[in-house]
Image (cartoon, helix red, strand yellow):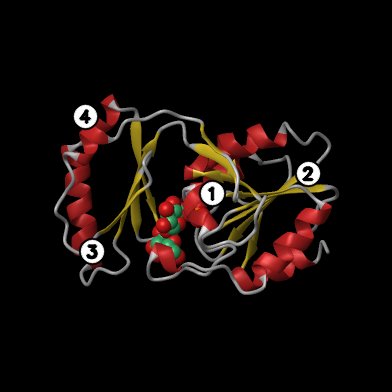
Amino acid sequence: MRAENPVFFLDYDGTLAPIAPRPEEAFPYPEAPRVLEALRARFPVYVITGRRVRDLEALLPLSGLPVVGGHGAEEGILGGEVRSLLSVDLSPLRQRLLPCEGVQLEDKGFALAFHYRGARDQEGVKACLRRWLEEVKGLLQALDLEALWGKKVLEIKPKGAEKGRAVLRLLERHPGHTPVCIGDDATDETAFRALQGRGLTLKVGPGPTAAAGRLADVDEVLAYLKTYL
Ligand SMILES: O=P(O)(O)OC[C@H]1O[C@H](O[C@H]2O[C@H](CO)[C@@H](O)[C@H](O)[C@H]2O)[C@H](O)[C@@H](O)[C@@H]1O
């Protein structure tokens, strides 16, 4: 499956970089920077990630690449300007953080990610996180935040931060282009749903999805992208 005149919306973790034990260790697949560089010389390419744009800069050495960060909470250019699209104050929530053993906290400023990939008792941590979610339910509502379970992570993010909204907004900037959207996680599903009937959507790896097609792993993602070069 190939799109004519594509605009690429590519997820980062699990799509351009294999899943790593810790967020700061998720380096791109060795070929990815070269392939992205060649691809963006021909077509518009965006990385749409749950990460902060600034955090991605440390991993992906592609100065000038446009990135939507925080699932849609911010937009910027690697090595350039980044602007917030949503304003949120997480300080009341930071005062109610939980003591779940084995959790690695990633504080993105506009969102909090509780990682438990490294925990010895992952089921125990998940149960602890669920209990905490119950406790802070009212606060999340008051702050207009929502919980999103991803790959060995619970994220608390602004309600409006959604990849689906982000890809539709970006698509308006590229009339006549067909979106090619590739992602592997729960957060990518809003983008797959938003683009239904409008372009190509590809889920990486197993699991239920709204995407129209599937790629097995990062290796296959790169092989697929190379068919456009
Ligand atoms: O939208 P993405 O680019 O897929 O980002 C989603 C989250 O990815 C990161 O966490 C995930 O990847 C880590 C590195 O492989 C892994 O250790 C972790 O278990 C995964 O959940 C990132 O840290 C988050 O901020 C992103 O929201």
Position of residue 216 relative to residue 11, above or below, is below
Between the residue at mark 4 and the residue at mark 3, the CA separation in whole angstroms equals: 24 Å
Position of residue 5 relative to residue 91, above or below, is below
* Numbered disc 1: secondary structure: helix
Q: Are marks 2 and 1 in contact (CB under 8 Å)?
A: no
Query: Which percent across, then down, holds residue 29?
Result: 59, 71
Label 3 belongs to which residue?
A: 123
Task: Please tell me how crowded label 1 is: few (under 14), some (14-19), or many (20+) other residues with Cα within 10 Å.
Answer: many
Label 1 sits on what residue type? Answer: Asp
Image quadrant in which the C terminus is located: bottom right
Task: Please tell me how crowded label 4 is: few (under 14), some (14-19), or many (20+) other residues with Cα within 10 Å.
Answer: few
Between the residue at mark 2 and the residue at mark 4, the CA separation in whole angstroms equals: 41 Å
Q: On the rendered structure, is 34 left or right of 26?
A: right
Q: On the rendered structure, is 179 left or right of 112?
A: right
Between the residue at mark 4 and the residue at mark 1, the CA separation in whole angstroms equals: 26 Å
Instruction: Using the image, tell me which numbered label, if any, was put on residue 178.
Output: 2
Q: Nearer the viewer, mark 2 or mark 3?
A: 2
Position of residue 3 relative to residue 143, above or below, is below
The total number of labels drawn is 4
Label 1 belongs to which residue?
A: 188
Instruction: Give the farthest residue toward the front.
Output: 80
The one of 140 and 84 positioned closer to us in this rendering:
84
Within 8 Å of ligand 1, the CB of disc 2? no
Image quadrant in which the N terminus is located: bottom right
The mark nearer the N terminus, 3 or 1, is 3
Q: Are marks 2 and 3 in contact (CB under 8 Å)?
A: no
Ligand 1 quarter of the rendering: bottom left
- The quarter holding residue 142 reads top left
* Numbered disc 3: secondary structure: helix
Label 4 sits on what residue type? Answer: Gly
The one of 112 and 14 positioned closer to us in this rendering:
112
The mark nearer the N terminus, 2 or 3, is 3
